[in-house]
């Protein structure tokens, strides 16, 4: 039975805390007069009709949103006080590809962290495939790129079924590279990421090591859309903006009057700015007076987010929003460990036998993401690249005490030598 549920808000909601203190409703333009209401909006008032989703797709959307908001809350908690912009969707896709190589308790831990415990891999993969297709086809008036690639060490022989699966469900480009030629490998991987983000993210990797790195699983996400009801450049003015710590700064504040989806609750205020035909939108959330930005972020669970988006109703608003650009970079070993998948990062413990070469043990060395976003009177440009670096567990150096030797017993903090002996033959 198909389910009716909004699909696409989450694709751009990853950076909602960025603008969480950014919008106001002062009804004046640059000259101090009310800004004329947009009489010819390209989007009818109200939100677009929800997409028809299968039960499996609905579960996937719920899982994606659960993971997205959990990741956002955890990053915000561990990076307290920082301005940040992340793409949980990009991370979910990159880790979703990686999940196909995991087995045993490692796979179970990853599935719990990703919000899909107990689901079969085929169901998870198929849901990823269907959602990617929906996002790509949602609105031809905006530019949306969602690309995947696996760059592996060509001197290693991986499980063919793993590559077949990622090609089938994630449309992944699979390419073997000479990791011993680090400059060429870096140029290839970084060039791929740069090309798929319109040059906005120039590099995702800083080094390649042939001896102990096996592969990089990479997702690139790019979005560029014009507002359905754009701001007038002439209405932008300098104005004070209150930071999260209570201090103020001067910013370029855009202003526009139009019908916007809006909701106000006791603890927050929310507005949605549609792009293009209205399928994509930026959702901006302000904490209520007396509540901090951190309190707002901590309250944004998946049910609360669903309540927020379901409660939006058209309202005639004089909206003020800062013009800004931001780049952000982070690695999430600590974040994902806190979310329960620490075993995947433990060399010698992690189980990736569903993709690993014979005789090799693999583990996740890092999960790294770079993002950018630019918001202006015309619209928004945003992108993300997530790279999962897979390392090889180094074999321990072997030392055999199989011949005559000297030994000592000592106290290490003082250096006191208590006993010394030599073994010419085993007694």
Image (cartoon, rainbow, N blue to C red):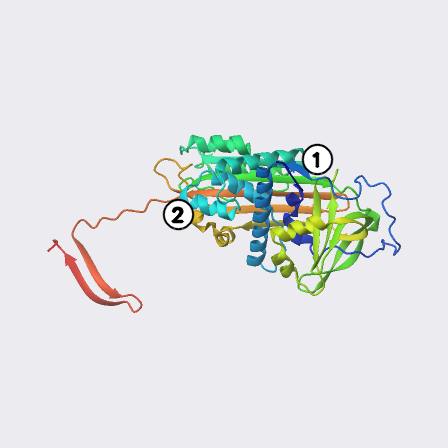
Inspect this view and state whether residue 177 appears. Answer: no
Residue closer to the observer: 415 or 265? 265
Residue, disc 1: 139
What residue does disc 2 label? Answer: 347
> Is disc 1 surrounded by few (<14), some (14 to 19) or many (20+) residues within 10 Å?
some
Residue 8 rendering spot, x and y as whole percentages: 66, 41
The residue sitting at 71% across, 51% down in the picture is 284
> In front: mark 1 or mark 2?
1
Please give left or right for residue 152 compared with residue 170 in the image.
Answer: left
Q: Position of residue 411 (x, y in %)?
A: 27, 67
**Mark 1 vs mark 2: which is more N-terminal?**
1
Quadrant hosting residue 30: bottom right
Secondary structure under tag 1 reads: loop
Which image quarter: residue 17? bottom right
Residue 75 visible at all:
yes
- Secondary structure under badge 2? loop
Please state, as top left, top right, bottom left or bottom right, where the C terminus lies in the image: bottom left
Q: Residue furthest left?
A: 427
Residue 328, position in %: x, y? Answer: 61, 50
Q: CA distance from mark 1 to mark 2?
A: 43 Å
Q: Work out whether residue 199 or residue 17 is closer to the camera in this orientation and state it.
A: 17
Give the camera-side residue of 319 and 251.
Answer: 319
| Mark 2 surroundings within 10 Å by alpha-carbon count, few (fewer than 14), some (14 through 19), many (20 or more) | some
Q: In the displayed image of the protein, which residue is found farthest to the front?
A: 1
């Amino acid at each position: 039975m198909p389910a009716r549920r909004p699909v696409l808000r989450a694709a751009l909601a990853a950076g909602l805390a960025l603008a969480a203190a950014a919008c106001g409703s002062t009804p004046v333009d640059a000259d101090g007069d009310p800004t004329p209401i947009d009489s010819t909006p390209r989007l009818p008032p109200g939100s677009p009709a929800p997409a028809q989703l299968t039960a499996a797709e609905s579960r996937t959307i719920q899982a994606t949103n659960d993971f997205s908001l959990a990741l956002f809350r955890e990053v915000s908690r561990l990076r307290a006080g920082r301005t940040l912009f992340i793409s949980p969707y990009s991370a979910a896709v990159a880790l979703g590809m990686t999940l196909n190589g995991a087995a045993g308790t490692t796979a179970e831990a990853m599935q719990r962290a990703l919000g899909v415990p107990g689901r079969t891999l085929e169901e998870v993969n198929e849901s990823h495939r269907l959602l990617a297709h929906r996002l790509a086809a949602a609105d031809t008036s905006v530019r949306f790129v969602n690309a995947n690639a696996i760059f592996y060490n060509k001197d290693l022989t991986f499980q063919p079924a793993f590559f077949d699966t990622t090609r089938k469900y994630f449309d992944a480009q699979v390419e073997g590279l000479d990791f011993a030629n680090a400059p060429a490998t870096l140029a290839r991987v970084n060039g791929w990421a740069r090309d798929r983000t319109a040059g906005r993210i120039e590099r995702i990797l800083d080094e390649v090591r042939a001896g102990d790195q096996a592969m990089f699983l990479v997702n690139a996400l790019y979005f560029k859309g014009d507002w359905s009801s754009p701001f007038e450049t002439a209405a932008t003015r300098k104005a004070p903006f209150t930071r999260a710590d209570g201090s103020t700064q001067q910013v370029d504040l855009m202003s526009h009057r139009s019908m916007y989806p809006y909701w106000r609750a006791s603890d927050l205020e929310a507005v949605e700015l549609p792009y293009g035909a209205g399928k994509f939108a930026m959702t901006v959330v302000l904490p209520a007076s007396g509540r901090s930005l951190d309190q707002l972020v901590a309250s944004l669970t998946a049910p609360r987010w669903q309540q927020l988006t379901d409660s939006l109703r058209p309202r005639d608003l004089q909206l003020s929003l800062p013009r800004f650009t931001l780049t952000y970079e982070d690695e999430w070993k600590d974040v994902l460990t806190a979310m329960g998948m620490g075993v995947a990062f433990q060399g010698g413990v992690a189980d990736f036998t569903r993709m690993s070469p014979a005789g090799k043990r693999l583990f996740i060395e890092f999960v790294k993401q770079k993002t950018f976003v630019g918001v202006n009177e015309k619209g928004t440009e945003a992108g993300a690249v997530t790279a999962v670096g897979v390392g090889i567990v180094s074999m321990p150096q072997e030392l055999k005490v199989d011949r005559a030797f000297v030994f000592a017993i000592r106290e290490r903090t003082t250096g006191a030598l208590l006993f010394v002996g030599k073994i010419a033959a085993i007694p």
